[in-house]
Image (cartoon, grey):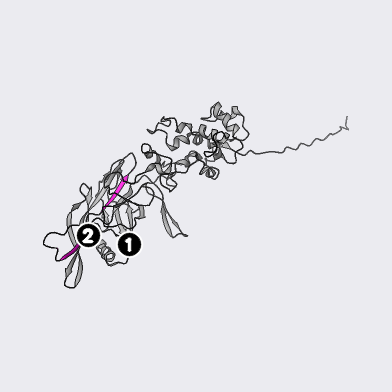
Amino acid sequence: IDYRDRDDFPTSYFDPVTQKNYYGIEETPYLNEVEASPKPLDIPPGLKEIIIKIFDGGEYIELYNPYPFDISIGGWRITTSSTGTSFIQTFSSFLNMFFIPIVIPEGTVIPANGYYTIGDTMAIALIKAGNRVVPTLWPIEPTPSGCDQYHPIFLFDLGGNIRLEDSSSHVIEDTYYGPDFWTPISLEKNDPRVKKFYFGLGTPGKPNSVFLPFLGKELNLLNWPSSFAVKNYPFATVGELGDVHSGEQWKTINFWRGEDTAIADQFTTAEAVKEPIRGKININTASKEVLMGLPGISEELAEKIISARPFQTIGEIFGDYSAEDEDPKKILNKAMIAPGKDFRDNDNDGFVDEDDEKEEVFRKISNLITVRSNLFSIISFAQFIRDKNG
């Protein structure tokens, strides 16, 4: 939905089975890194007799904009919550009543392919008071250095939810960041669209240490920005489904490897009623000359399509990525994805050999082909009539 709708906030869906809210992907920044439990701070000289520990000072929250344009985030809000029942978590929840939400100043813009980091100004000190230990607010120097904004932050060490809302209270992201520990280790995302954090080395305002776009086997360290595709306009072809993120790390709906080809037969793009209905070419029966009439189909590719017949779904025109090299379906697969393996920028988007180039031919023809044809039985009756009036 969010790939094609024209609003600028993620669509929310509540699943009655899992009792969870799911959010779509729009052209928005993402929660990208969280430091919920920094190393405890040094106790000032002369205070070690009354202070047991100073901790949770230097927490930070990082937003990341992977898109090639600036995004306004003025007035956006960040809130946190936890289901923990420990004393410190209860105390943190109490403090959050006063310091949360974090509101990003009006007029703030997060730059293209840039970061916006919110640092901390407050820690918690455990102070001896007779036989008791009293948690107390402890102001600190703005930490870490170089952040875009500073605010008292009280994230929950044992894990909690963090929510990002825009200035109109639309939920941009609501995710669980997981438990953290009193170490230099932070919680970082790999693919910012996937709501899962991993232990990282702590990189506020910089690329995450766990940033590995090649894990989805579709991208590399140079062309990964091409996968952040949001059209904000209706699908033109079924093949465009290949731009839709699958919900897994650095993976979109994949046709060229054969993982999601069956999907292509489950969807169609609708035309206005006033438009004429165009016939489709049956790739199981069409001649070479007819196949060559399709965009992007050369004589050589048409011959490979014919050699790899029959096809059960239109997605099978990709052949079989996992077949043996001499198999006609493997030969067809190599030919179909060739535009994405020729070290050229075939679609003029500034990136070479990315996933959508491997599906370029299919996207051009997916609305024009079928694997079925209508069969008609024509029954003709003849009757001889003698003219008796002559």
Name the secondary structure under disc 2: strand
SS at mark 1? Answer: loop
In front: 274, or 38? 38
Label 1 belongs to which residue?
A: 82
The percent position of residue 233, horizontal first and vertical second, equals 43, 41
The total number of labels drawn is 2
Q: Nearer the viewer, residue 113 or 258?
A: 258
* Residue 46: mark: none
Is the residue 18 above or below the residue 73 in the image?
Answer: below
Is residue 228 something one can see in this rendering?
no
Q: Nearer the viewer, residue 208 or 77?
A: 208
Q: Which residues are magenta?
A: 44-68
Judge left or right: residue 64 versus residue 376.
left
Residue 346 screen position, x and y as percent: 43, 30
Q: Is residue 89 above or below residue 291?
A: below
Instruction: Write down the residue under mark 2.
Output: 55
Task: Residue at 20%, 62% (x, y): give it.
Answer: 53
In percent of width and height, residue 44 lies at 13, 59
**Vertical relation: 169 (above or below) 72:** below
Question: Is 56 one of the magenta-colored residues?
Answer: yes
Verify whether residue 247 appears in magenta.
Answer: no
Q: Which amino acid does the dot numbered 1 rest on?
A: Ser
Whole-percent x and y of residue 159? 33, 59
Q: Are marks 2 and 1 in contact (CB under 8 Å)?
A: no
Question: Position of 140 compared to 332: left or right?
Answer: left
